[in-house]
Image: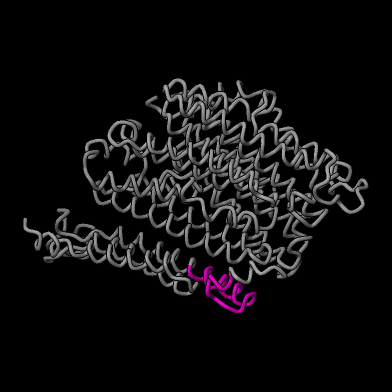
Amino acid sequence: MGTIEFIIGKYNYWVYIILMMVGFYAMIAKHNLVKKLIGMNIFQWAIILYYVSIGSKKGGATIPIIQNGHGEVTHAIEAAQYLNPLPHVLMLTAIVVGVSTTGVALALIIMIYRRFHTLEEDEIIDILRAPNK
Amino acid sequence: MISEQFPALIIVFPLIMALLINVVGWWKKGLCFYMALLAISASFISSLGILKTVINKGTIHYRLGNWEPPWGIEYVVDHLNAFILVIVSFISLVVTIYSKKSIEKEIPEKIPQFYTVFTLLMMGLLGITITGDAFNLYVLLEIASLASYGLIAMGDDKAPLASFNYLIMGTIGACFYLLGVGYLYIVTGSLNMADLSQLLPELYQSKAVIVAFAFFLVGVSIKMALFPLHVWLPDAYTHAPSTVSAFVASTMTKVGAYVMIRVMFTIFKPYFAIEIIPATTILGWVAVTAMMFGCILAIAQTDFKRMLSYILIAEVGYIVLGISVANRMGMTGAILHILNDAFMMACLFFIAGAIMYKIDTGDISQFRHLNRKMPFTMAAFTIAALSVIGIPPTCGFFSKWYLILGAIDAQQWVFAVALVLSSLLSAVVFFRVIENVYFEGSRGQGVKGSVFDEAPMSMLVPIYIMVAGIMLLGVFSGKIISTVIQFAVPTGF
């Protein structure tokens, strides 16, 4: 398999890794707390995209349902014929976790802003280090 | 029989109670403490029941909603989790008793919120410990972490920023864990730990499995603050309310260590981490660095709680060292140290809280003559300090003894020397404080009016429960090893 096919054939993994690294960079390198939080969100959503992509198939795959449950003639019995719904279901939980983490982080950001009137991390550290604080 | 339902009740009861506490808190603040106490006592009784059943009848498999594994979520309790469950629920019970006065002083306006989130945190930690499903563990890990971010942010002025940094780091850790689960799911199609451990050995050469293991290890290391990934810990634990630091310091890192043992030796077979990839060797050196680094930085601190935080980083190093030597003695030491360290850390942070309650500062140079003002607290501090250093009648000696035996068994002489050396360093750390408190000197000022003014009973009693625990666990460590820990050591050693 050539390099091009290798990249194109597994493009979902490349997309998730690139997104994850974008988020990772923002979390490490940015000084603004909101930018850090956005980076964290990109990081989390990249993982969610990755999970969703591993459950999907191309080429007429269908949903797994009980045999003749609704009077169908053909069924998805072989693993190749149906989409795996489990990763998607897992991601419902991960989305909830991600949303609540964002909620907590936003609440913390509000608390920090009320105390220091800035969201730049280096400015906050300067305020904290100031002698007569 | 209700005892058969203990594995579910231990989680469900505090979860429901946490919601009720929040509702009742609008109406009557005074009730919150008692409701939390009730929920946590129920969990403690359940955990004792579980431990008894496990000792008598062996591993418990509890199917939630009667769905068969690997499709449904299964709670699996063997000797190792039953042991950790008892530790976590007992510590939370004592912390709850301690919290009453301390919270009333430090965060009086947030009492209902505190007890809601506190109960949730305990429930999350128990859930992590009890579950037999890799994805369920992720969800509970995040519940526990979110609760701890909230609790830490209730602290002093610097707490929200510390908590935010912890949140960013903690989320990276949890996401790495989630990625690890994802990679294993791709190659096996299963999320159940027992199922995974049967399916994986054929795939051990696969790159995806090795990457999954690496993600697991790094993710868990962030959560348990193993040395290079510890940066969030000192800030977060220093600025949190003292009750919260006592609870998270004594339980969260220990539960992290438990997850590490589970991943390395249950989901993966022990020979994977020892022979196929050199994970244990790397962890061993990381642990040695953590021990040295923690103790040396602890010497440099002027704030009492911050000093304890660095000691905690060193203690995490001890536990990981026991895991990494990967033999029976080392594992015994690591599991025993999880128990001992939970007691020692709870005791030390309780004392930090009591001092904070009375003199409103954590600055060590202000502690002079504190033995006249708070003789009982300071006596307790001395005993806990001796235990951390590892002086024989206290429990700290016994776990260090097993750790050193483990290192010698594995012929890792450097590790054995490092253990002794870091004990000496922690002696320096604690004697610096003891000297400052008990002995005359010219540096620093004395506590204003060093007359007898002891911490309230509701703080002193938990401190002395922990001191009694430190002594008794030392005396009965042989008994604990023969009834529980020898069965808790993972198979394959």
Q: How is the image coloured?
A: one colour
Q: Give the extent of the magenta segment.
A: A102-124
Residue A6: % across, % down: 12, 59
Residue nearest the observer in this picture, B338 or B364: B364
Question: Residue shown at 48%/40% (left/top)?
Answer: B289
The question of residue A118 being in magenta is answered with: yes
Left of B370 or right of it: where is A101?
Answer: left
Residue nearest the observer in this picture, B235 or B50: B235
Residue B400: % across, % down: 57, 28
Left of A38 or right of it: where is B4?
Answer: right
Taking B113 as reference, is B128 above or below it? above
Question: Residue shown at 48%/74% (left/top)?
Answer: A34
Which residue reaches farthest left?
Answer: A1
Residue nearest the observer in this picture, B448 or A24: B448
The image quadrant of residue B178 is bottom left
Q: Main secondary structure of the magenta part?
A: helix
Residue B7: % across, % down: 53, 43
Left of A81 or right of it: where is B418?
Answer: right
The question of residue A114 being in magenta is answered with: yes
Quarter of the N terminus of chain B within the rendering: top right
Which residue reaches farthest front?
Answer: B442
Left of B352 or right of it: where is B484?
Answer: left
The image quadrant of residue B394 is top right
Residue B1 visible, this orientation:
no
Residue B67 visible, this orientation:
yes
Quarter of the C terminus of chain B within the rendering: top left
